[in-house]
Image (tube, rainbow, N blue to C red):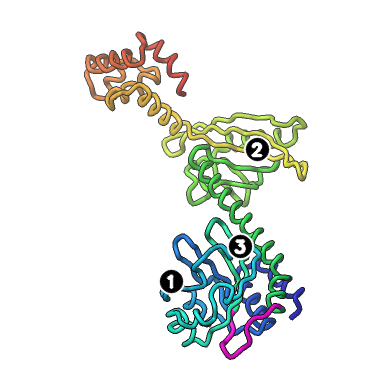
Amino acid sequence: MSEDSIALTIYTTLESDGRWEKVLATLSRRLSAHAAALAHYDFDTGAGGTLYQYPADGPLAYVYSQKTPVNPWFMSSSRYQPGSIISSPELITTDDFIQTDFYREVLRPRSIFHRMCGVVQRHANHIHYIVLHRKKEQAAFNADDCGILLRLMPHLLTTFGIRARCQTSARLIEIMGCVLHTHLPSIFVVDRNGCVIYQDQETQPSSFPYLGLYVDKGMLMAADATAHRQLREAILRLGTTNEADKCAILELTGNADVPRLRLSLRSITASHQDEKLIVVTISNLKQEEGLALRSFADQFALTPAEERVSALILQGMSPSRVATLLYLSEHTVRSHLKQIFRKTNTHRQAELMNLRGHFF
């Protein structure tokens, strides 16, 4: 196979990692190698191994495992720079090499001797490399062999550079997804017809906690007919307006089974298509109120009993009503309320309600 054909095969690994086996097979045939592998090694920890090898059941998985004696090819990291081509004699003389336990116990029983490798990626002291081996009775890798691998190296470096950027992007997306799911309301993105373009993990059918909303045949729906009509009208209005960044707020009244929701709808423009999309963020009002009450109690170091009283007082209830609901005497409720006033530096329920606005 020509070098151009091998280069094209290298780029196909961006579509499927499994195609590295074909790359290694073609390299082995082109360079008359007994075995080849894509492997990695960490000079700090000594950990490493093969990712793919040819033949698939070949000896290199064991040769580069951590179960073997000290590998003399990795005694120094300085030669292993991205794009470098390294043959075994450059790292250790042949006479010294054949005296090592590594050669006697690992390579000789597996008919492996000559080695050539090319470093395709390095991050700190962690490397990825292509390695080829020949038997002892074969000729050593020469300058022409090194030249072939050297001419293929730009393609290998480009491929691994793209892989690294893709992995970084995927990791960033994963991290941002965790941030969104942890700290922001649940999100849908729909088009002007209500067709769902994106939904985060919290709004997947198996985990979506808001029973008043659901996705049916790819469309965002509200269970209540009136709420559904309001939702459709808001989406259509925002999807057809010529003004950017328009928004609408809808509140869906809950019941014993369906929590009360606030939907915030905002129009955005997909710049590459000039298409109007609507971002729908969903807030469970009961959960938000609970978090706000928790924050209020934490801010002023309220005791659990004071927190329970404050939660009802901040809903506008009288001390007598709070006493009834909590099965307490009104005297006990007023004692708790007095402590709440002291800790919040307020003197009346009206002042406490005004303070509530900073948390709700």
The Cα atoms of the two marked residues, 3 and 2, are separated by 59 Å
Secondary structure found at label 1 = loop
Residue 207 vertical position relative to residue 68 in the rendered view, above or below: above
User: What's the distance in space between the residues labelled 2 and 1, CA to CA?
Assistant: 61 Å
Q: Magenta segment, which residues?
A: 133-143
Residue matched to label 1: 66
Q: In the image, what residue type sits under mark 3?
A: Gln
Seen from the viewer's position, the closer of residues 92 and 5 is 92
The disc placed on residue 81 is 3
Q: Along the polypeptide, which appears first: circle 2 or circle 1?
A: 1
The total of numbered circles placed on residues is 3
Q: Nearer the viewer, residue 100 or 63?
A: 100
Which label belongs to residue 232?
Answer: 2
User: Measured from the top left, where is residue 304 in percent x and y?
Assistant: 28, 27
Horizontal placement of 300 versus 245: left or right? left
Furthest toward the bottom, the residue is 137
Instruction: Identify the element where label 3 is drawn.
Output: loop
Q: Residues within 10 Å of mark 3 (few under 14, many from 20)?
A: some
Q: Quadrant of residue 295?
A: top left
* Tag 3 and tag 2, C-beta contact below 8 Å: no
* Quadrant location, the N terminus: bottom right
Q: Amino acid at mark 2?
A: Arg
Q: Residue at x 63, y 70 (%)?
A: 118
Which residue, as the protein is rendered here, is positioned at the far top? 347
Residue 80 vs 340, above or below: the answer is: below
Q: Disc 3 vs disc 1: which is toward the camera?
A: 3
- x then y, percent, for residue 46: 45, 65
Q: Residue at x 63, y 29 (%)?
A: 248
